[in-house]
Amino acid sequence: MKKNKKIFTAAIAAAAAAALSCNAYAQTKTVDLQVGNAEMRINGESFELDSPPVIADGRTLVPIRAIVEALDGEVDWDNASKTAVLTSSTGDVVKLTVNSKTAYFNETSAQLDTAPVIINGRTMLPIRFVAESFGYTTDWNAADKSIVISNGGETAKESTVDLSGYTEGISASDADGNIYCDMIGSGDSCLLIKDKDGNAIAVYKAIDGNNEIYKDKKGNTLVCSYVLGKDNSIELTISVNGGERTAKQDDNYNTVDEAGNVYEFEGEGTISVKDKSGKVIEEYETTNELQYPYVADNGSTVYKVLRRGGGYEDGFIYADGKYVPFENNYDWSYMGSDGRIYNTKYEYIIVTDSSYKKLEEWTAVPNGVDVVYIGNDKTEYVLTGEMAETYVLTAADKKITLTCDPEEEHNKKLLAGGSYGTDDAIYYNGDDKNVYVGKDNVFTVYDGSGAVIDSIRLYRDDVRYISQSGEKYIYSYNYDESDYHISSDKGTIELDEIMG
């Protein structure tokens, strides 16, 4: 359906007039360490480590628990797999496995220069990767082999993002009153976080790629991570249960893991895992959940999450360990001439007030879509049927059946799938003895002598809805006027697009 690009600016808050600068201020914290020294200082206060930092393969490794807790994080340890799960105060999750150079930041894989190791019964992790994943910076002094970890506090780098060309889309509010606004720009988007008074707290920029979540019957989670490569090709990585294994596409576009198992995408949302002999050893079904990452200057990540096919309340922000549902997550939103907002989502129209408070809900009538054509004499026809088979044009006082002749010369070329150029048209024989030539949503009508007697063109799309109280509505797009409107027994409501 053709889109109407008019923006009703009075209905939504304008973005910042020029540029928005915002700082996410936090309490200053500095952690001082030194290789071979078991003393750790946090903001000048001394603490003793149970194992001093060491250097391995040119990288500094530190004892896991004391350092992560010093950075306001939490540690979970899986002894069976020798995997450490680190959770930051903002909800970001880092997973590292002893003797493995593959780490995971919020399910996205990364390669380490040095693998975690166990020394004297203590798990030692690469400090730079952990600290920067938690939003801290690290400074190394080679002279005395000391490390300074800092979050910057009041001197944190200012995040300046020009939002003058952005429009505020869907938003969400958490229990603390913070507002998460999806800002739509020209070709990109970002996430603006404001406090309850409307002051900017942080800006997160969208990055390429997304994660698609699958599960098997045992509850195991498989994550497909899609990233746009340098040559605009899609790079696919698969992880299972947070990194027990990974799989990537080979040169033949087969998705294969380290063990040689092949991951086949079958039908709608199914992945079958086959071993080298071709035997299916695992099957996963999509959860219909897509995760889109947004990253701030300090490296912290939040996700915009969409769940498909589960009604229209299917979007939320995952941030700081919390799931914050969108309040106005719709496919399209229109300001009505009656002052209400009409929002479409799947087979629904949700009517809200100007603050997106829900007033009514309408459901599309099954098979309730009419494609309306109009002739030169203003006769309106409803078109039904399929191209290359039979079309029916139904008007108030007549009905014309159009039958495709597959042996007609032009039709042969069209049905053969060739290149048609100016002959890209299909010919129908009408039961009114006229010939109808269909091209570009127009039927040109010829009489028996070959003279043009009418031109019947695409005019309007009508979708019928019914409200919970039983009232009937028709949601229409008029191709002549390039506008949307809703009609009912009560009259017509003109619509201006404000989001879509």
Image (cartoon, rainbow, N blue to C red):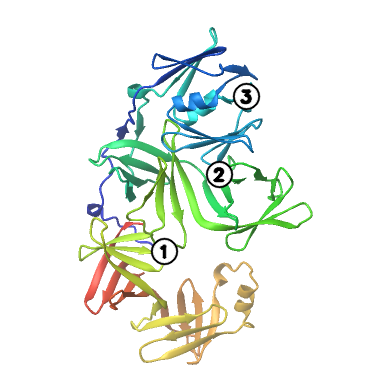
Instruction: Label 3, secondary structure: give it.
Output: loop
Q: Are marks 2 and 3 in contact (CB under 8 Å)?
A: no
Q: Residue at x 44, y 24 (%)?
A: 70
Q: Where the N terminus falls, by quadrant? A: bottom left
Q: Badge 2: few (under 14), some or many (20 or more) residues near its Cα, within 10 Å?
A: some
Q: Quadrant of residue 230?
A: top right
Please, is residue 243 above or below residue 266 in the view? above
Report which residue position mark 1 lands on: 311
Q: Quadrant of residue 188?
A: top left
The tag earlier along the polypeptide, 1 or 3, is: 3
Q: In the drawing, what numbered circle is on residue 121?
A: 3
Q: Amino acid at mark 3?
A: Gly
**Could you give the CA–CA distance between mark 2 and mark 1, rounded to whole angstroms?**
30 Å
Please, is residue 326 above or below residue 294 in the view? below
The percent position of residue 305, horizontal first and vertical second, equals: 44, 50
The percent position of residue 285, horizontal first and vertical second, equals: 58, 59
Q: Does residue 53 appear in the picture of this structure?
A: yes
**Could you give the CA–CA distance between mark 2 and mark 3, rounded to whole angstroms?**
41 Å
Report which residue position mark 2 lands on: 228
